[in-house]
Image (cartoon, coloured by chain):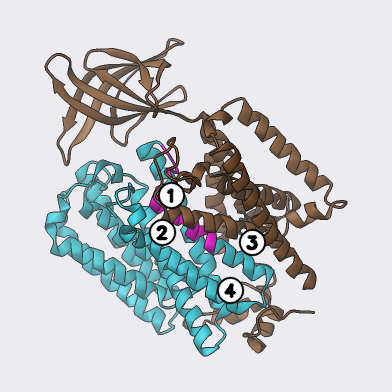
Amino acid sequence: MQMISWNDLWLFALISLLLWVAASWLSLRGGSRKAVCLLAIGGLTVFGSYIGLMWHSLGHPPLRTMGETRLWYSFFLPLVGLITYSRWHYRWVLSFSTMLSTVFICINLLKPEIHDKALMPALQSPWFAPHVIVYMFAYATTGVATLLALWQLCRKQDQLAAIDNLTRVGLSFLTVGMLFGALWAKEAWGNYWTWDPKETWAAATWLCYLIYIHWRRCRPAAVRPALLWLLLCFVCLQMCWWGINYLPSAQGMSAHTYS
Amino acid sequence: MRKNAWGMTRGGLFCCGLMAAGMALQLAVGPLRWDALAWPLNGVCLFVLLTGIVLMHLCRRKVRLFRWMATLQAGIPAMLTCAMLTVLMGVTRQVPTGHAPAEPFGITAMLSFWPFVLAYFWLMLLVGMVTLTRLRPRWRNVPFLLNHLGIFIALVAGTLGSADVQTLRMMVAEGKTEWRAVDVRYRVHELPVAIELHDFSIEQEPMPVFKSDVTVYTKNGLVVRDTIRVNKPLAVRGWKIYQYSYEESRPEVGDISVFELVRDPWLPYVYLGIFMMLAGAVALFFGREKDDSQQAEGFDKGHNVSSPVLAHNSQERSELTSDSNSILTSKT
Ligand code: HEM
């Protein structure tokens, strides 16, 4: 069998992207859910085969360089998108995941030098890509929930059901991301939770979202405070994501400076 | 509602009291010394904690306080207190683990700051109590139990077990065998495992990775020959041996490889908690709450871009639509 290389990426990527774009377009138009899923699965199969073949020709899982990690992003983003779509039928979600996936594919195609740029050893872990991807989805779902909350606060339109649900989904992604992070840290550094600034903010953010879902059960009629709290949660999430890079107290303290 | 409101206020007051008590403790005895909790003391604490929770649960019909502890009115203020202290930790520069705080209050060593410790302890106690109220084996209790029991186990094992975690550095020169290691305070420990370093090298492909070719001996006669590299620790008899760093070759000794040895006897329980929470998160993702089955029809049609998928019952929803800005108005 002929060995596959980076030079073949464009072909696989093109076919997968066409399928994913078709799926996104169909789902935006409210087309048949089965067709949407089949198209998305088709794209995943094609892209997945590329990763499989790369794995085969490299002789190790493609996890060692930036470029290889981006392959996993491009694969898992549409996968998580598809799972979210098939469970909750949010029509925008496939477009979002396809868009992100396209960005990573384009980086891989347009900047071939990153194929050789090795990751620092601690990042060469099977936990790394899932950890990042799950967090990306958490940002997306909670982001949409925040927008809807703002909308409801300003326009007084009831979006509560969708907000609650997106927040639940977002919280489940946050939980998984946080715990994958812990498992990975244990493997790489020998400690699952070191309370470095990123982890501290992740814990705070997680607690804030936890408060939201418990508050919604406890005081279902107290909507306004809940929505305002949700805005605060999102601020906390931003802090966790990029804010700490500018926080004086966190300078030079974090093991997460690569992110 | 009146009663509920009181419940939440009481929760807040309780947390304020806890903070005050914590602050008093902090000023009286100084930061908490986690290492004092080492085995067997943490075992005793675990026993007392679990028995206490079960006893309080059993007395809940007689004692209102215990009944209240398993409610959201108690839980939410506890989460809020923990969140606030965690944010405070996030905005202050923390001193390295094991060091004394850099200011008189102790918030720069947050993990040893009594109010912080007590807040998390309170949260742990509450989530333990909540778990017991729903311990009946019903399918709909499963996601609840995975999440709540999961975090309870992870918190208990993680905090009580932290004093038993040993993290040591061992420096071994090529061709030598070493069994002594130093902890973060540079105290020397003699270990039940010894490492013989055959060869240390730096792999260049695709980026520098240190690796050590070693034989590990244990006191009871186990001999393991293996290669340790960054991210590929070696597990021997409860110890995990990580490649930590190295020192440049010195003329008289050759290369020196630095290992980090970690022993964490409570780790399996922390993992148990973590995996329960992971399963709980999956359940949270896929799960529906009660009472939404009759509305499943509506959402399956998905007319709306953000199709409302129902996290609460219809009665609640109509109440909200009709009256979405009157804060804290109630069913009464
Ligand atoms: C950390 C401490 C926690 C406390 C003190 C706490 C407390 C509570 C309480 C009192 C209830 C109401 C129980 C009832 O109505 O029967 C509840 C429900 C719930 N909690 Fe928590 N909880 C905690 C953590 C979590 C976590 C980590 C999650 C998930 C990520 C979670 C998710 C839920 C959900 C989804 C419900 C409603 C589930 C149902 O009724 O089946 N909680 N919690």
The circle on residue A115 is: none
> Residue A89: x, y in percent?
48, 75
Q: Are marks 2 and 1 in contact (CB under 8 Å)?
A: yes
In the image, which lettered chain appears cyan?
Answer: A
Indicate left or right for B159 with B179 as reference.
Answer: right
Residue at 58% across, 48% down: B115
Q: Which residues are magenta?
A: A191-208
Marked residue chain, label 3: B
Quarter of the view holding residue B198: top left
Residue at 47% across, 75% down: A146
Amino acid type at mark 3: Ile
Q: Quadrant of the C terminus of chain B?
A: bottom right
According to the image, label 3 marks what residue? B76
Quarter of the view holding residue A39: bottom left
According to the image, label 2 marks what residue? A134
Q: Secondary structure at mark 4?
A: helix
The verdict on a common chain for dots 3 and 1 is no
Q: CA distance from mark 2 to mark 4?
A: 25 Å
According to the image, label 4 marks what residue? A226
Q: Nearer the viewer, residue B71 or B37?
A: B37
In the image, which lettered chain appears brown?
Answer: B
Q: Are marks 3 and 2 in contact (CB under 8 Å)?
A: no
